[in-house]
Amino acid sequence: MFDCLCSDVYALQQQLLLLLRERETYKQLLRCRDELAQQLLDLLQDLLDSFPESSARPRLSKALLRLSRSSGLHPTCFTLTGMEKVGEQVAGGAFGDIWKGLVGGQNVSVKIMRLFKSEENFGREAAIWRQLSHPNVLPFFGLYYLERRLCLVSPWMENGHVLQFLRNAPPDTDRVSLMLDVATGLEYLHSKRVVHGDLKGMNILVTPSRRACVADFGLSSIVDAMTLKFTHSTVSARGGTSRYMAPELISATESSAMHFKSDVFAFACVCYEMLTGKPPYFDIPNDMAVILMVPQGLRPKRPETIAADDSLWLLLEKCWEAKREDRPTVPQIIQQLVGPTIGAQFSQATIDWDETFSAKCRRSLQAWPLLPSVAAIEREIFGDGTHS
């Protein structure tokens, strides 16, 4: 459909950003459907791939996410071919079932959408996940349609999630450095304006080199510089795991419930799990009781094996402050973890998955001989008329 040349990809990105800043143009873009929506989604994704360090990524990512949600489509390059399931189901959760699979001779993890869940949830997760690249963040390989069911494909982690790993690990395993891995992954997410939204032990996987990486972005949100606002009903509908939720997410006393600092609260709950092998509030079996009591000040109990003045425990307590502005930022958490009193060690800089495999799933915009001009995009969105 687009028939205009644009030799300067960067100029195209800048011109597209100007369109996205115009409210009416943005609204029209989000009304695009079918072939035009697909072309725009592919263009947005290719721009994101071409400029991985661009300051425009949050705005482009958010536009891609919103258009994907409104159109029910996703960028073409997300879709994989030639995958097969291996063995039996490995695990199941609220959003899907986990299987082992093979793609191009490589073991992969396959998250198969439950039939009663809309594909919008998975499309959203894929759109956010696809933009991320960090050693402490599980990479996204692509989407696959298996027996008419949508699947999310990522690297296979033989060590499982961090709780499984620690359950079978020697008692002297360096748990604090694993916590540092999680914090480093979370710092990266926040630097990309991504709020995870569902941090818990089962969503932290352990790589072959025994590094922790953050996974499962089904509840994640991309926020802009003004911080995206959510109503209480939106947060409730999105779900989340109650035992890891900050007080403001439960009581919705603040309009912007989903926030980087709610991830900080959940991070401390994950650290508690890693220290004790038990979920937060394990002595309270009723989830509803936990939901009612957390806004009233309930917090995980300090294990008897940890002193009240222990530096790590004091850090966790700070992360559990009732007011989110009183909680530390993730960079501040990292600074304390690597400080002399706690002494966490950064893991060796290794990549635990085949980046060439991931690259094969991507197309380079710069290799395209034809690119749409912004004028062509405007004509496609608005027709032959003009807009104000």
Image (spheres, helix red, strand yellow):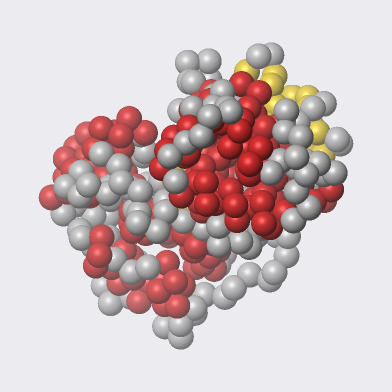
Residue 365 percent coordinates (x, y): 76, 47
Picture coordinates of residue 52, whole percent (x, y) = 66, 58
Q: Residue at x 46, y 56 (%)?
A: 193
Q: Is residue 195 rendered to the left or right of residue 54?
A: left
Q: Where is 287 relative to 343, above or below?
A: above
Residue ranking furthest to the left? 296
Q: Specify the quadrant of the image occupied by residue 39.
A: top right
Q: Quadrant of residue 75?
A: top right
Can residue 244 be seen at all in this image of the molecule?
A: yes
Along the line of sight, which residue is nearer the eye, 385 or 24? Answer: 385
Q: Measured along the vertical axis of the image, is residue 38 above or below residue 293?
A: above
Q: Residue 68: horizontal and vertical position, in percent?
A: 54, 32
What is the residue that sits farthest to the front in this orientation? 385
Quadrant showing the N terminus: top right
- Identify which residue is drawn at 42% across, 51% down: 223
Residue 105 lies, in percent from the top left, at 86, 36
Q: Residue furthest bottom?
A: 340
Left or right of 208: which side holds 346?
Answer: left
Question: In the rendered view of the protein, which quadrant contains the C terminus?
Answer: top left
How many numbered markers are drawn? 0
Residue at the image point whose x is 81% and y is 33% from the top: 103
Q: Of 375 and 169, which appears nearest the observer?
A: 375
Q: Does the rendering let one see residue 142?
A: no
| Residue at x 35% of width, y 34% of height | 239
From what the image shows, is residue 116 above or below residue 361?
above
Tell me where residue 361 sits by quadrant. top right
Q: Nearer the viewer, residue 107 or 228?
A: 228
**Relative horizontal placement of residue 290, taking residue 134 as reference (left or right):** left
